[in-house]
Image: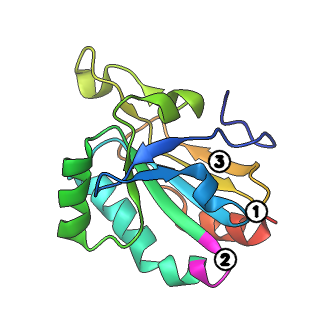
Amino acid sequence: MSGKVGTRAPAFTLLDTDGNEYSSSNLSGKRAVIAFFPAAFSGVCQEELCTFRDALADFASINAEVIAISTDGRFANGAFRDANNINFPILSDYKQTAINDFGVAWPDFAGMSGYTAAQRSVFVVDSSGDIAWKWLSDVPTDLPPFDEVKSQVEAAG
């Protein structure tokens, strides 16, 4: 599988911050923003997820869901959610299946040999489950182009 534009988004089932399974099937029939981020409690990740939090009503008004995925455990993600009042799902990909399926695994992240994190990336998935647009960063401090994300979600069917 891969996260190529025009292909079916890889299916996943991951744990949310409360330990419940969250499946990509929850997004069926909706547009989705799937934001992969490297690490809870890093400044850039906080800014990214808080920006999505602040735009959530805009996404909801066009029938779009926002979810975030990192390789952090659900407990770290839960503390991060609570500290930042994040009101959308933050999922734990601790087994690294989704980051591998989407092609956004970042091995030896931050110079830590053996530690694999998610590459900062955003996928827009249309209501039929296909990847309509993606953005990838090779620099962990780069933020996604939020206005472009929103316009791509609006354009996705």
- The secondary element bearing badge 1 is classed as loop
| Residue 59: percent from left, percent from top | 58, 76
Given residues 1 and 120, the one toward you in this image is 1
Crowdedness near tag 1: few (<14), some (14–19) or many (≥20) residues, C-alpha within 10 Å = some
Q: Which mark is residue 63?
A: 2
Q: Amino acid at mark 3?
A: Lys
Magenta segment: does it hold 121?
Answer: no
- Tag 1 near tag 2, CB within 8 Å: yes
> What is the magenta range?
60-64
Earlier-in-chain disc, 1 versus 3: 1
Q: Amino acid at mark 1?
A: Ser
Given residues 40 and 78, the one toward you in this image is 78
**For residue 44, above or below residue 99:** below
| Residue position marked by numbered label 3 in the rendering | 134
Earlier-in-chain disc, 1 versus 2: 2
Given residues 126 and 112, the one toward you in this image is 126
